[in-house]
Amino acid sequence: MMTLTLDTPALARQYEDLSDKQYEHGKLLIQALGLGLGWRVLDIGCGTGRLTEYVAGLVGKAGHVVGIDPLQTRIEIARARASTNLSFQVGRAERLDGFFDNSFDAVYLNSVFHWLSEKRQSLAEIYRVLKSGGRLGISTASKERPHELDRIVQTVLRRPPYARYPDALETPPYKVTSEELSALLEQAGFRVRTVEIRSFTDYFDSPGTVIHFSNASSFGHFLSGLPQFLRTAAIREIEFELEKYRRPEGIVLTRNVIFAVAEKK
Ligand SMILES: C[S@@+](CC[C@H](N)C(=O)[O-])C[C@H]1O[C@@H](n2cnc3c(N)ncnc32)[C@H](O)[C@@H]1O
C-alpha cells in the first residue's frame, strides 16, 4: 500500500548521501531531453534536489527550474540549494494546480513514475503545463525486466512465513512495461520520441548498504508490507542472498531502467 507517511528526516538525509545511482542515470535522462539555455523546467518528485540543481546549471540564469516533491523532509534539504533560477516546493504529480497552462519547456520525472498510482491524471497535468512542443522525460523501473535486487527480495518474500503477506512483494507498487508507458503517453496526447530500457551495474560495499539504499530510495517502503516482527528476519535472509553477489569489487547488482522522451504536440 502506497503511503507518504513512512519517510523520516534521517531517511531523507540518507537519500541525499546514497542517491548517486539515481543522480547518474538522471543526467542521462536530462541529456536525452536536450535542454537549452533559458528554458523553464519542472522536476516532479525532485527528492532532495541534486538533479534539479544540476539542471539549473544547464538552463543558466535566464532559465528557471522548479522542483516539487510531496515529502516535506526532502524539500527541506532541497531548499538549501535554492538560488535565483532554482526553487522548490511541496507538491505532487497528480495536482499541478499551482502552475499555469503552457508554462514549461520541459518536465521530467527521474525514478518517480513507478510511485504514481494515478498515472493518467499526472500525465494530463503534465500535458497541460507544458508548452506546445515541450518535452517530457521519464526514467522508471521496468516491470518487464525487474532489478536484480527486486528479484532477490521477491525470492525471500515468497518463502514462509513471509509469503502470507503478498502485498510486500509490490515495491515499488506501480511499475509499467515499456509498452504500457508508450500507450499511456500516447493516450495522454504526447508524441513518443524514444522508449528504451538501459541496464546499469551497481556496486555496494555490503548487503547492509543495499538495504539502506533501498529504504531511503523508497522513503521507508522497503519491506513495509511485512509486519514489523518479521522484518529483521527477512532482512537477514535478504543479506544472506546478497552475499552470493559478492565479487572483488563489492556486491554487484544489475538495475534496468526505462527511459522515455515524449513531446507535447
Ligand atoms: C527515488 S526518489 C527520486 C528522487 C529524485 N527524482 C532523484 O532523481 O533523486 C522518488 C521520489 O518520488 C517522490 N514521489 C512519490 N510520490 C509522488 C507523487 N505522487 N508526485 C510526485 N512525487 C512523488 C518521492 O517523494 C521521492 O522523493
Image: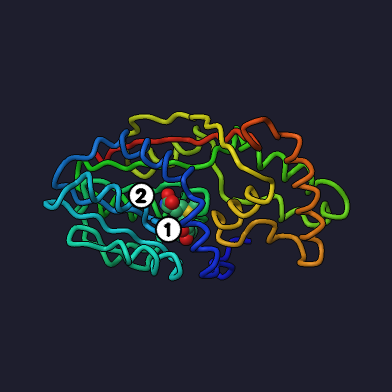
Report the amino acid beneath label 2.
Answer: Leu
Which of the 4 image quarters holds residue 161? bottom right
Q: Is residue 225 left or right of residue 102?
A: right
- For image coordinates 48% across by 35% down, the residue present is 258
Decide: is 255 above or below 59: above
Mark 2 crowd level (few <14, some 14–19, many ≥20, 10 Å Cα): many
Q: Quadrant of residue 3?
A: bottom right
Q: Are marks 2 and 1 in contact (CB under 8 Å)?
A: yes
Give the quarter of the figure containing the N terminus: bottom right
Extreme residue in the right direction: 160
Q: Position of residue 129 (x, y in %)?
A: 25, 54
Quick one: 34 or 211, which is closer to the camera?
211
The span from disc 2 to disc 1 (Cα, nearest Å) is: 9 Å
Q: Secondary structure at mark 1?
A: loop
Amino acid identity at mark 1: Gly
Q: Position of residue 120 (x, y in %)?
A: 43, 51
Looking at this view, is 198 or 180 the one in front? 198
Residue 146, percent from left and from top: 62, 37
Element under disc 2: helix
Whether residue 190 is situated above or below residue 66 in the rendered picture: above
- Quadrant placement of the C terminus: top left
Q: Is residue 129 left or right of residue 199?
A: left
- Within 8 Å of ligand 1, the CB of disc 2? yes
**Residue at screen point 33% across, 66% down:** 79
x 37%, y 35%: residue:
28
Q: Nearer the viewer, residue 140 or 190?
A: 140
Q: Which mark is residue 47?
A: 1
Q: Does the rendering let one see residue 96? A: yes
* Residue labelled with disc 2: 51
